[in-house]
Amino acid sequence: MKDLSGSRALVVGGTKGIGRATALALAARGAAVTVVGRDPVAGAATASALRAAAGTGEFLAADLSLLSEVRCLAGAVRERTDRLDVVVHSADALMTRRVETAEGLETGFAVNFLSRFLLNQLLADLLRAAAPARIVHVAAAGAKGRFDATRVPPGPGTSAFRAHLLGQHANDVYAVEFAARHAGQGISVSVLNPGFVDTGIRRTDPRLRPLMRLMERALRSRMRTPEQTAAVVVRLATDPDLDGVTGALFGPDGTRLPVPPTTAAPAARAELWARSERVVGAVPAPTVATREDHRI
């Protein structure tokens, strides 16, 4: 196990499930970990567990479906540190029906992709300051099929299901383009497909229970615990054998996946980046960089 003493990690979606398990695993190796989530009760409990494990740990509250709050979050992180060694994105929003945010974006796509794109942009200099640094996106790595960047962001006629698939595929395309744009800057990015993980979501959202029960029956033999998946996330974030590996996709057990031609297509990558920049740029910056109620 690599000693992470002196390193700083940010785990977005770090108060429950895979994110919480990842935060605790990083703290156990000595990292100073900040977790991000919506639930202040879960956040306070996770921060307490981190402090018990490593003597340090902090929670920042943010609604990741709102890009204005992502900007607030970036400001709060910057107030606390001038470097980041690891950023893990594990927040996910699986919606049963389309819901638009106050900023006019489909909620799932905003959480699953746009928040990640914007936060990485806003914190890139902190990652460069810690080079070599790593970003890990937990998403459906290895998505098949043609990626249509012209659907970014998903329009009013796009269902929550299709918007979720678009966001998952966008994470793959983004990783390849990020690697190309940040070559030589000491920031590596990877995308992990966690597979079917028992995160407890089927017990907390009544609308998802029927679907999750069906998936559990079909995939019971391959179901993983959050801790098992967190071990893979930590390896991708810290393993010296992966130094210099960037723009890579990984399966649930950490096996490297081939990058589909449609994911690697330069035109689609450039289109996704340009459209994403326009979307996040259209949301004005908040009047203050941070909010006191975002700190616990």
Image: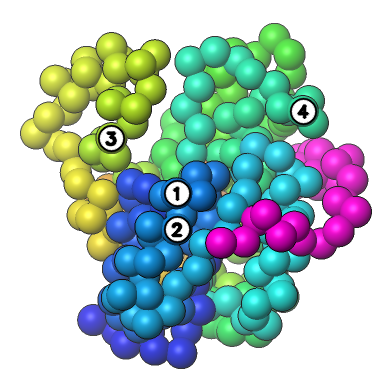
Q: Earlier in the sequence, mark 2 or mark 3?
A: 2
- What amino acid is found at the position of numbered circle 4 in the picture? Ala
Which residue is denoted by mark 3 in the rendering? 200
Could you say which disc has been placed on residue 41 in the image? 1
Q: Nearest the camera: 1 or 246?
A: 1
| Label 1 Cα crowd, 10 Å radius (few <14 / some 14-19 / many 20+) | few
| Residue 13 seen | no
Asked which secondary structure carries label 1, the reply is helix
**Count of number-bearing discs:** 4
Side (left or right) of 232 relative to 70? left
* Quarter that holds the C terminus: bottom right
Residue 181, image x, y percentages: 70, 64
Which residue is denoted by mark 4 in the rendering? 102
**Residue at 45%, 58% in the rendered image:** 44
- What amino acid is found at the position of numbered circle 1 in the picture? Val
Which residue is denoted by mark 2 in the rendering? 44
| Label 3 Cα crowd, 10 Å radius (few <14 / some 14-19 / many 20+) | few
Q: Main secondary structure of the magenta part?
A: helix
Question: Rounded to the nearest whole Å, what is the CA distance between mark 2 and mark 1?
Answer: 5 Å
Q: Earlier in the sequence, mark 4 or mark 1?
A: 1
Residue 247, image x, y percentages: 52, 59
